[in-house]
Amino acid sequence: MKVAVIKYNSGNVQSVLYALERLGAEAVLTDEVDEITKADKVIFPGQGEASTAMNYLKERNLDKLIPNLKQPFFGVCLGLQLLCSHSEENKTPCLGVFPVKVKKFLPESYAESKVPHVGWNNLFDLKSPLLKGLDDESFVYYVHSFYAELSEFTIAQTHYIKDFSALLHRDNFYAMQAHPEKSGLVGEKILSNFLKL
Amino acid sequence: MLTKRIIPCLDIKEGRTVKGVNFIQLRDAGDPVELAKIYSDEGADELVFLDITATVDKRKTLVELVTKVAKAINIPFTVGGGISTVEDVKVLLNAGADKISINSAAVKNPGIINEMAREFGSQCIVVAIDTRNVDGIDFVHTHGGRTPTLLVTQKWAQEVCDRGAGEILLTSMDHDGTKSGFANEITAEISAMLSIPVIASGGAGNMAHFKDVFTFGKADAALAASIFHFKEIPIPELKKYLDKEGLPIRSQ
């Protein structure tokens, strides 16, 4: 089995590659249309700013490719946001796989809630084979200022300031706002479930 | 619910841990990778590696260490010590560090915070602030707290936040090493003032000190070194205690 990790101007790709290595998966970091199309699984990591990332994808025609891929596809962090229809971050139109809007966290006061949402928070209302074997209330590691709203594609929620989509699923597309590669055993389980899809 | 983070800090010199550690299960007491793995297994929420290697040529050792740590553990970690350029940050992030922390370099050239945040995103730029109270006023100190500056801590904290820091690691030099508790007053003051998380450091001596810094100190995370290294407070016990005290704590 070959896993393509989409290469773009996103930080922290290395950690995703190491996590896959720990799970014994054969992974390749690539922005080649051919190589991505042929892979058995595709992981779309992310960290950074939405409009810059979208421009980078457009320059390489990956914005056309990604929504048409047929194999199991996993967007992580900014990867989840880019799979949605629109992000409030610099008013960026995104890939539109999930007809869901991405919004900025607006706390009532910073004494109560900081932005970004940094640290370990729990999932709840889990409903997907991707989350098989996980306890309700499993903790995952978050670092983000924008969130996807709840929708019919939400397969797990997290509460920070309000309930938001922790994970999304539609057809062959899966996405997670937290970082599975940094979420200890829980994250490892999710990645390993994805590899088994 | 977002949980309060417990962060052990490992001091590194030439790729080895320097402060004595007292882990019987360690085969090599100076091996940071093995120690990192144990802390991660015990439920530490994050790790900080502070490189105190002075010379530039030894920095290569640090990058090799970061790669090894990133391969071995699956929780976030920050690397600090002697980082002053965008290039320094790039090398460490590419090796697998999740965040970097800068201290003296930011005081010397505050614009570097903007530059780093723009290049890599605020989420991976931690600004460490060492503070000491002098005649009732909190002043920023550099070089391990030895060199006083004219910067007032509260003002500097606001400035680094405005310049794009993602988190602040606040160490009270008055409390550091005393085991008499964290500097809750200034931690609370800064935490309430800023939109970004504050990691409190310096002074941890018992489990109640952690509870105090999360409640009175309004800290988002607490960092300590020797009390963890010497097993004076085992992390699982600390987390169990904090959970019982009603604080939001991650269980594994």
Image (cartoon, rainbow, N blue to C red):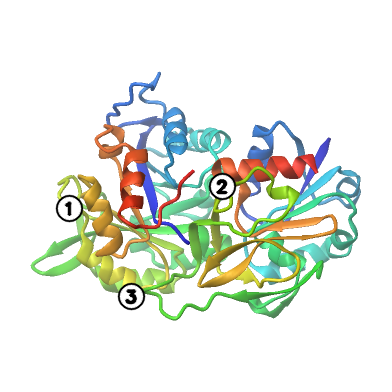
Q: Which x, y percent locates residue B39?
A: 42, 36
Quick one: which residue is furthest to the top in this view? Answer: B27
Q: Nearer the viewer, residue A92 or B159?
A: A92
Give me the disc on residue B161: none
Q: Which residue does the numbered mark 3 point to in the structure image?
A: B193
Q: Residues within 10 Å of mark 2 (few under 14, many from 20)?
A: many
Amino acid type of disc 2?
A: Ser
Residue at image position (68%, 34%) is A23
Q: Which residue does the numbered mark 1 point to in the structure image?
A: B175
Q: Is residue A9 visible from the viewing direction of this image?
A: no
Q: Tag 1, which chain?
A: B
Q: Tag 2, which chain?
A: A
Frontmost of labels 1 and 2 is 2
Instruction: Give above or below for B110 relative to B5.
Output: below
Amino acid type of disc 3?
A: Met
Q: Residues within 10 Å of mark 1 (few under 14, many from 20)?
A: some
Q: Which residue does the numbered mark 2 point to in the structure image?
A: A183
